[in-house]
Image (tube, rainbow, N blue to C red):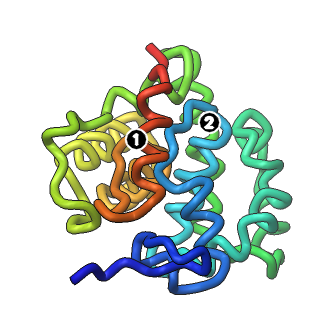
Amino acid sequence: MSNDFIAPDGLPRCQWCGGAPEFLPYHDNEWGFPVDDDQRLFEKLCLESFQSGLSWRTILNKRENFRTAFHHFDFRKIALFSEEDVQRLLQDAGIIRHRGKIEAVINNAARAQEMVEQEGSLAAFFWRYEPAPDALAAPQTQTTSPESIALSKALKKRGWKFVGPTTAFAFMQAMGLLNDHSLTCVTRKRVEQARQQFQPPA
């Protein structure tokens, strides 16, 4: 028997997207679709790090506040943040006021700049960790993978912070490096088609 969530249109979706009204549009329009835009990739990795220990609903509901506070996650601008900016962000009730995570975003922005200089783009680096289709376990049955562990290690080696294997795996799920929609979810096929049309950056 399927555990899928039956959406208002009568069609099955991944069970988790029935947990809150705001999950359905995120699930249908963003989660799992391949992304090669550096700013979006950086944003998602930052938001996943903020989610650590919290629910995705909390982060999703604050996402626009995060975008305003962090210049829409333009890492070139964030890399210039000072202690004064840290203090400003610690006073911002619209975001998660966690000094370590805020400072990690600023640190990671500088690391992102370095990566672009070395690799050409963040996307070119991240998409090297796309798993082979036959390497995937059943959808939504794991929270890490060999690829997410390898990505986490590579980022940490380059000086990135708050990028553990679970955070890396959630990032890979969301940004389309793997299709983790349930097998009967109607969005799964749309994601498969989007991936077929997507050319990973070299």
Above or below residue 73? Residue 162 is below
Q: Is residue 19 above or below residue 103?
A: below
Quarter of the image with the N terminus is bottom left
* Amino acid type assigned to the residue bearing label 1 in the image: Glu
Quote the CA–CA distance across marks 2 and 1: 33 Å
**Mark 1 burial class by Cα count in 10 Å: few <14, some 14-19, many 20+:** some
Within 10 Å of disc 2 (Cα), the crowding (few <14, some 14-19, many 20+) is many
Residue 175 on image: x %, y %: 49, 46
Q: Residue at x 53, y 29 (%)?
A: 122
Please state the horizontal and vertical placement of residue 135, each as a whole percent of the image: 14, 42
* Disc nearest the viewer among 2 and 1: 1
Q: Which one is in front, 194 or 178? A: 194
Q: Is residue 108 left or right of residue 179?
A: right
Q: How many marks?
A: 2
- Disc 2 is placed on an element classified as helix
Q: Residue at x 47, y 20 (%)?
A: 199
**Is residue 107 left or right of 170 when viewed as pictured?**
right
Q: Nearer the viewer, residue 76 or 175?
A: 175
Question: Residue 145 at what x, y percent from top left?
Answer: 21, 52
| Residue at image mark 1 | 192
- Identify the residue at horizontal 32%, vertical 62% (top origin): 166
Q: Please name the residue shown 61% across and 64% down the image.
A: 26
Mark found first going from the N terminus, 2 or 1: 2
Image position, residue 112 (x, y; %):
57, 33
Q: In the displayed structure, would residue 137 be above or below residue 135?
A: below
Q: Is residue 84 visible?
A: no
Q: Quadrant of residue 132?
A: top left
| Residue of label 2 | 110
Q: Residue furthest front?
A: 10
Quadrant occupied by the C terminus: top left
**Amino acid of disc 2:** Ala
Q: Residue 140: which quarter of the image? A: bottom left
